[in-house]
Image (cartoon, helix red, strand yellow):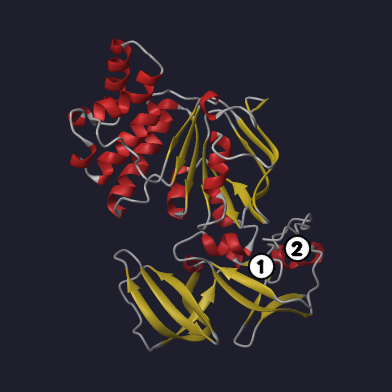
Amino acid sequence: MASLTLKSVAKYYGTIAAVRDMNIDIADGELLAVVGPSGCGKTTMLRMIAGLEKVDAGDIHMDGKRINELPSRDRDVAMVFQRYSLYSHLSVCENLGFALKARHLPPPEIKRKVAEIANLLHINHLLSRQPHQLSGGEQQRVAIGRALVRNPRVYLLDEPLSSIDAKLRIEMRTEIKQLHHQLGTTTVYVTHDQAEAMSLGERMVVMKGGAVIQVGRPLDIYNHPKHSFVASFLGNPAMNLIPGHIIRQGSQTLFENESFSVSLPPPLANALGYATFSTDDEYLLGIRPEHIRIGPGPAGEVKAVEMLGAETLLHFKLGAHELCLRLISTSVPLVGSHITCEFSREHLHLFHRAEGISIDGQRNINWRRKI
């Protein structure tokens, strides 16, 4: 196992910054999930750690040792790619043992290590088969096993479950989490699936446009997004974001737009006094679907109803904006009907619309990174 540190790391392709000013500390034995939309620099980050891409600026340290110029073969990392990349002419057993054979380990030791990994991944019965005889999930297990059998200091997983169906993805991510608990190896897991990142990661990194937007424990990031992009990216469905302005009425601070107004709770009202932004600016009011309920408040028309079994999603028009409400009830309004909704004030979020920065009650709100 090993710790990893990325200090001001950057990667450029011509004038395009694929990764810029990345600063991350990954603890020994940690499973760090990295999530973001396609093209945000997730895979490039992994490839730089693996030594498959040159670091154009900054430093990567493993256990305190700078590894920028260290060849990939000497870094003792194993990478699982999005595509399984199994050797089609070799059996499962031969695929698993290939890296060990290349290191000239004795055949009895190779056999023992392959048997251990096959048993760990429940693929003992597949050892004599060829890759084309395997299902997608089985091929993925073999690809993971080929990395595990090397017993590296760091595992790098690049969207390993994106090519298999949804049900099997859920099963496989449970198995990956169990494997990590058993092995305790430092793991960096890259995905574009925010549910996968939240369920797997002990900590999570959210990226956009080559930049790290927020780092923290999954639930902390979900409950306290520091940027409107994070708020809109995490959650299914995502947080509702409504543009409007701030007004003062006596001792109250209100968020107001053309359709409704809502009194901000004291922490948000006080935070506006700490922020470096003007209250004349435009803001975004954030509220998650589970924190809106049918009750006294502004009225809107139901535009769509999604029945999901234990819960129902209502999409309704509130003035010019469409919002989503999560409902746990057997009584569901019909499309075209009108409802009144109530916001849970203690779960309101506020973001500066132009900068995207959260106004969250912290005095040090000076983040100005362009994304």
x and y, in percent, of residue 252 in the image:
74, 76
Front one among 105 and 307:
105
> Are there few (<14), some (14-19), or many (20+) residues within 10 Å of tag 2?
some
Q: Is residue 205 above or below residue 311?
A: above
According to the picture, the residue beneath numbered tag 1 turns out to be 350
Q: Locate residue 192 relative to residue 358 in the image: left or right.
A: left
Crowding at dot 1, Cα within 10 Å, few <14 / some 14-19 / many 20+, comes out as many
Give coordinates of residue 219: x percent, y percent: 53, 50
Whole-angstrom CA distance, mark 2 to mark 1, is 10 Å
Q: Is residue 39 above or below residue 101?
A: below
Residue 217 shows in the view: no
- The residue lying at 48 percent from left, 28 percent from top is 185
Q: Secondary structure at mark 2?
A: helix
Going by the image, does 96 lie left or right of 227? left
Do callouts 2 and 1 mark residues in contact (Cβ within 8 Å)? yes
Q: Nearer the viewer, residue 95 or 317?
A: 95
Find residue 43 and report its horizontal and vertical position in percent.
52, 46
Q: Which of the two discs, 2 and 1, sits closer to the camera? A: 1
What amino acid type should be assigned to the residue bearing mark 2? Ala
The quadrant in which residue 118 appears is top left
Question: Is residue 277 in sight in this rendering?
Answer: yes
Quadrant assignment, res 255? bottom right
